[in-house]
């Protein structure tokens, strides 16, 4: 609740601003739905999401140049996909997207990011001061993890803003769309998915509007 009431004041790094500006040029000219694949890693999930949503512009964002540099190995060869991969820190990218009035059709935040130690709660996305900006982007939020407590906490944080979320197990035979998901599945771990429809206008919190 403290983060919902107080805007995130950390200065935005210039390289993140430049990366966002390149993407914004495409978004400004785009008339269809926008799907964001945050923490996309090697971009395997981004390519998959684009294949499943040919009518959308799909944007994958990750802060690691090394992971993004491995995308060719995981790239889906299907023709007609419309997606881009961007290197940027999401703490800045999400804030810039809200500032540019993005409204997402869907937002994927996949593995892993649990930070299981209690002392590190603030490093989990829903415990971070940037979380209100995730809410402000709207759209259908999809999160996956092998740690159901993490998703249960996310659902509780969404309930604070009167947004309901469902958590369901992913069947063992489902098709993995990230290397982490494939690794967890092969090791026999139960995987979970959270889904929530965030309000489109983002007016259930005041911090961003107060900036």
Image (cartoon, rainbow, N blue to C red):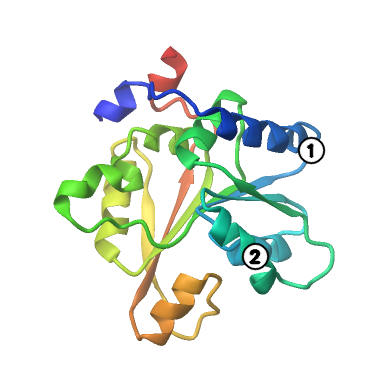
- Give the residue drawn at x 40%, y 33%: 132
Q: CA distance from mark 1 to mark 2?
A: 27 Å
User: Looking at the rendered structure, which numbered label has been put on residue 73?
Assistant: none
Local secondary structure at mark 1: loop
Local secondary structure at mark 2: helix
Question: Which residue sits furthest front?
Answer: 66
Viewer-side residue, 143 vs 21: 21
Question: Which residue sits furthest right?
Answer: 80
Q: Is 156 left or right of 11, judged from the image as shown?
A: left
- Residue 83, horizontal then vertical, whole percent: 72, 54
How crowded pointer 1 is (Cα within 10 Å; few <14, some 14-19, many 20+) is rated as few
Q: Is residue 145 visible?
A: yes
Q: Is residue 206 visible?
A: no
Instruction: Relative to 58, say whether 158 is above or below.
Output: above
Residue corresponding to mark 1: 31
Instruction: Relative to 192, say whether 183 is above or below.
Output: below
Q: How many marks?
A: 2
Quarter of the figure with residue 47: bottom right
- Residue 54, horizontal then vertical, whole percent: 77, 59
- Give the residue drawn at x 25%, y 30%: 1
- Residue 61, horizontal then vertical, whole percent: 57, 49
Q: Is 140 left or right of 195, judged from the image as shown?
A: right
Picture quarter with the C terminus: top left
How crowded pointer 2 is (Cα within 10 Å; few <14, some 14-19, many 20+) is rated as some
- Give the residue drawn at x 60%, y 58%: 68
Instruction: Relative to 52, say whether 35 is above or below.
Output: above
Q: Nearer the viewer, mark 1 or mark 2?
A: 2
Residue corresponding to mark 2: 71
Ranked by sequence position, the earlier of labels 1 and 2 is 1
């Amino acid at each position: 609740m403290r983060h919902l009431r107080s805007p995130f004041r950390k200065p935005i790094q210039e390289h993140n601003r430049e990366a966002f500006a390149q993407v914004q040029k495409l978004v400004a000219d785009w008339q269809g739905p926008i799907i964001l694949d945050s923490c996309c890693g090697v971009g395997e999930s981004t390519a998959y999401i684009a294949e499943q949503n040919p009518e959308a512009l799909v944007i994958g964002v990750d802060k690691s140049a090394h992971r993004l540099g491995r995308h060719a190995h995981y790239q889906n060869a299907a023709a007609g996909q419309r997606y881009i991969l961007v290197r940027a820190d999401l703490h800045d990218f999400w804030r810039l997207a809200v500032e540019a009035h993005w409204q997402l059709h869907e937002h994927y935040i996949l593995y892993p990011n649990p930070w299981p130690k209690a002392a590190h709660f603030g490093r989990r996305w829903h415990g971070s001061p940037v979380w209100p900006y995730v809410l402000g982007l709207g759209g259908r939020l999809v999160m996956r993890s092998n740690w159901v407590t993490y998703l249960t906490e996310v659902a509780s944080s969404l309930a604070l803003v009167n947004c309901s979320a469902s958590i369901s197990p992913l069947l063992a035979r489902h098709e993995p769309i990230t290397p982490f998901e494939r690794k967890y599945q092969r090791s026999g771990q139960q995987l979970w998915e959270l889904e929530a429809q965030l309000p489109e206008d983002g007016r259930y919190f005041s911090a961003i509007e107060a900036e």
